[in-house]
Image (tube, rainbow, N blue to C red):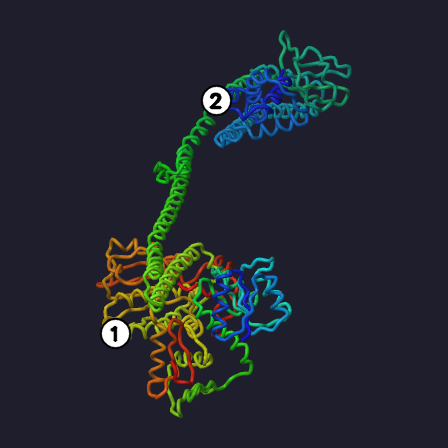
Amino acid sequence: MPATSCGRTARGETRQAPISRGTVNRIVPIWTKIGWTKIGWTKVGRTKVGRNKADRIEAGAGTPPTRESKRGRLLFRLRRSPLLRSAGLRFAALYAIIFGLSALALAIFLWWATAGLLNRQVEAAINADAQGLGERYEEGGIPALILTIQDRLSQNVDENAIYLLTDGGFHPIAGNLDNWPTQVSASDSWFELVVRRGDHEALARIHRYDLPGGFHLLIGRDIGSRAKLRSLLTAGLLWALLVMVVLGSAGALAIQSLFKRSLADVSATADAISRGDLSNRVRISGRGDEFDRLAETINDMLDRIARLMDGVRQVSNAIAHDLRTPITRARARLEDAALHARDASDLHAAVERATSDLDGIVSVFQGLLRIAEIEAGSRRSAFASLDLYALLADLHELYGAAAEEQDQQLELLAKPPLAMFGDRDLLQQAVANLLENALKFSPAGKPILLGAVRLGDRIEIVVADSGPGIPVEDRARVTERFYRGESARSTPGSGLGLSLVQAVVQLHNGTLRLEDNHPGVRAVLSLPAEFSASRRLVRVERPASPKPGAPNPAAPAPV
Amino acid sequence: MRILLVEDDRDVAGFVVKGLREANHVVEHAANGRDGLFMAASEQFDAIILDRMLPGGVDGLRLLETLRAQENTVPVLFLSALGQVDDRVKGLKAGGDDYLTKPFAFAELLARVEALTRRGKSDSPVTRLAVGDLEMDLLSRSVKRAGQKIDLQPREYRLLEYLMRHAGQVVTRTMLLEGVWDYHFDPQTNVIDVHVSRLRQKVDKPFPKPLLHTVRNAGYIMRPDGEG
């Protein structure tokens, strides 16, 4: 009895851990055999499972839960059933439902087109007959009608026409029916009934007409052939239904397995990644379908994660090395002074040097924090429209003097206006970092170029020097934190300058290119001139420009 | 100058108090927000140096907001380990006049505190600045020394104006960069020194007594007497 087994299911299930994979697999064929509605197969599936489990469980003690909670938990379990949670099965079921519905629609149309058409043809023939007989009756009265009926009967080759003319007492006068069928009562309406004609019975469609003078007329057609057609069609459709079920199940299973196969790789990759193996990637079939696109997206994401992880590792290594060294130096100085200082001035000098070492450490530390802050993207809130030309002219003025001091020449190659949307402070700092590098590496007597040009919807800022340049193999790495090229090792600096430039450029959705200036470096910042409206929405008003002496609220920590 | 220091770290507080007293200021110290608020509200100070994160239920921001709500306009300098841009914006929005991030150099703190108090005093519009025999007319934007006209580039003029407005005070390189160039980063190279030395060429070199002096480990000071 289904009810009992359901009850047992509930009791069993409520005390049972979620069903195992093996059990689920056993359910599938049952479900496929039984039917397509969710409730149907779920119940069947659960009943089966429940019975198995319940049999095992019922040996164990325990008070059964109340009916209320039992039902609630059963529903809960059903909803959380692994079967329902399989997207593949859901899609397969959906496919089967759609397939079944379309097959049903086809059957209905077939039936309407064939049987319905026959019906309508019969009715049309009867109506035409009635009209003809009516005309004869009007011309010659009952005798003419009788003659016509006899004529028509003799000419009817198919022997499917049915006529019966009776008087007021329903006694047959003419026609091929032996007596008036008792079922035919109401006048001027359609009947479908079995009539006795001669020695055989037949299904007929009949219309009754009442004539003046109390005469009654039946006109009909034998529709036995239609009935035959119907049974033929029904059988055909039933077979078709069977084929449909088979095909639907096969299709559903195919879809499910396709899903399983397509997702298995993603799932396996994600598993491997979460276990810590970041080198795994989702296989791309090369068909360019949705699954391939999903795989590509996932792989891109994994690449980015891997890069970030690398970055973190790199930074921790760099901190370990680049901060440990100056800390060691400062510590050594202080300890040395404490142990060996001969007088106060010795001590004083050591303390001062240690302080400046600490300042260096702090500035590296703050540089790192600042890059992290920029990379986190929080600074987008400070984006505003700005005149890049004025920004570059100011920097040219600030660094031009320093360049002349070193016998270098800083040339500004830009034409106003250069309007763009961005963070003024960060752009200043990025260009300043590039200028400082140029000033540091360019030999005396050689020009340094600071330029900007608008190319379509982008603005390119160029800083070019004639220094030793960056070897091709180093170019990809110089923007890494703390990375310092061979030629830069001997110069002062933290190795964070280009990392900051890179972070600023990325924040502005731009790119940093380091090209060969033959000789020297040609750093190109390619930035979008305008940001999309959606970006601009996140902009908030900055406090008004401060008076001289007061710091700008957005003033960053010195780097 | 009477300065209130609200700082919970005893070492930092001791260091700042000692330094400020050596610079001839009167310093009161509160070690938590509640005491700080009480002192700031009940006594008259020329400036307050305020830590952001304070024990005692009242943090620096709350303290300042309460003060400002009482229409107390005492200049306040935040001295905080919270150094992100957002932190600064918050501090200045709450009514702070300046923001210095820890760790800091004492010279920088001293220069900024003294600049704060100076700014509070000059309320009436100034049209003329003078340091020794150096004169600056802010209306005609002309500079004369000992009656002799000095030609300056626009930026040199602004640099000199800033230095003269803070005459008698130490001005750090960061303050110059922020005040004259409106830059908010610390250049690794000596760009400011180059500009100051150019200004010196025009303002000091042709004259017997220098006005613009370098203060070691701190910055520059403009003052009429010839002592370095």
Residue A211 percent location from the top left of the image: 74, 22
Disc 1 marks a residue whose amino acid type is Asp
What's the chain of the residue with tag 1? Answer: A
Amino acid type at mark 2: Gly
- Residue A45: image location, x then y, percent: 55, 22
Q: Are marks 2 and 1 on the same chain?
A: yes
Number of disc labels: 2
Local secondary structure at mark 2 = helix
Residue A319 badge: none
The residue at the point 35 percent across, 40 percent down is A279
| Residue under label 2 | A22
- Crowd around label 2: few <14 · some 14–19 · many ≥20 (10 Å): few
Indicate the position of residue B53 as horizontal and vertical percent values. Answer: 54, 59
Find out whether the residues at labels 2 and 1 contact each other: C-beta distance under 8 Å.
no
**Which circle's residue, 2 or 1, is located before the other in the chain?**
2
Residue A531 locus on image (x, y percent): 44, 60
- Residue A407: assigned label: 1
Residue A211 position (above or below residue B120): above
Q: Secondary structure at mark 1?
A: loop
Query: Which of the two residues, A11 or A42, is positioned nearer the viewer here?
Result: A11
Q: State the residue lying farthest toward the top.
A: A199
**Which quarter of the figure is the N terminus of chain B placed in?**
bottom right
Mark yes or no: residue A129 visible.
yes
Dot 2: chain letter: A
Which quadrant would the C terminus of chain B be assigned to in this image?
A: bottom left
Q: Tell me, yes or no, if residue A383 can be seen here.
A: no
- Mark 1 neighbour density, 10 Å: few (under 14) some (14–19) many (20 or more): some
